[in-house]
Amino acid sequence: MTQENTPDINLEARRKRLIYRSNYRGFKEADILLGGFAAKFVPDMQADDLTELEALLEENDHNIYAWITKSAPLPAQFDTPLFARLQNYRP
């Protein structure tokens, strides 16, 4: 196994990518919430939480923001402890 393919390197690359994606969403309110959350929590996340956050970031920014602010119903697939942490996060 090369150094680039070790599990720790792959996790670190995923973390960096998620922090970047969370900060540059194109919707300022989502950038602030998701970017701040990612900067604080992603460095310590394990693979399962990273996978969950990657799936969330595939969703529309306005939907994510509405779910965070509870102005729209949260889909069942995102009703998780990770999303609860995101809803409780204050930048």
Image: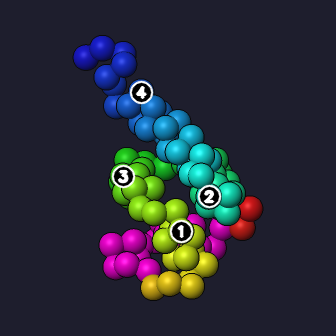
Q: Earlier in the sequence, mark 3 or mark 2?
A: 2
Circle 1 — which element?
helix
Q: Earlier in the sequence, mark 2 or mark 1?
A: 2
Task: Indicate whether 25 appears above or below 10.
Answer: below
Q: Which label is found at residue 62? A: 1
Quadrant of the rendering where the C terminus is positioned? bottom right
What crowding class fits label 4: few (fewer than 14 Cα within 10 Å), some (14-19), or many (20 or more)? few
Task: Evaluate if marks 3 and 2 touch, with contact meaning CB atoms under 8 Å apart.
Answer: no
Structural distance between the alpha carbons of marks 3 and 2: 22 Å
> In whole angstroms, how far apart are the C-alphas of marks 3 and 4?
16 Å
Is disc 2 surrounded by few (<14), some (14 to 19) or many (20+) residues within 10 Å? few
Q: Residue at x 61, y 78 (%)?
A: 69
**Element type where label 4 sits in the image:** helix
- Of mark 3 and mark 4, the one earlier in the sequence is 4
Magenta span: 74-89
Q: Residue at x 59, y 52 (%)?
A: 26
Q: In x, y percent, where is residue 80?
A: 41, 73
Give whichever of discs 1 and 4 has the lower sequence position: 4
Q: Is residue 53 visible?
A: no
> Which residue position holds label 2?
27
Q: Which residue is mark 4?
A: 9
Q: Earlier in the sequence, mark 4 or mark 2?
A: 4
Q: Do the residues bearing badges 3 and 4 touch, measured as CB atoms within 8 Å?
A: no
Q: Magenta stretch: residue 86 in it?
A: yes
Q: Identity of the amino acid at label 2?
A: Phe
Instruction: Name the residue carrying label 3.
Output: 51
On the image, the x and y values in percent for residue 4 come to 36, 19
Q: Residue 73: image x %, image y %?
A: 45, 85
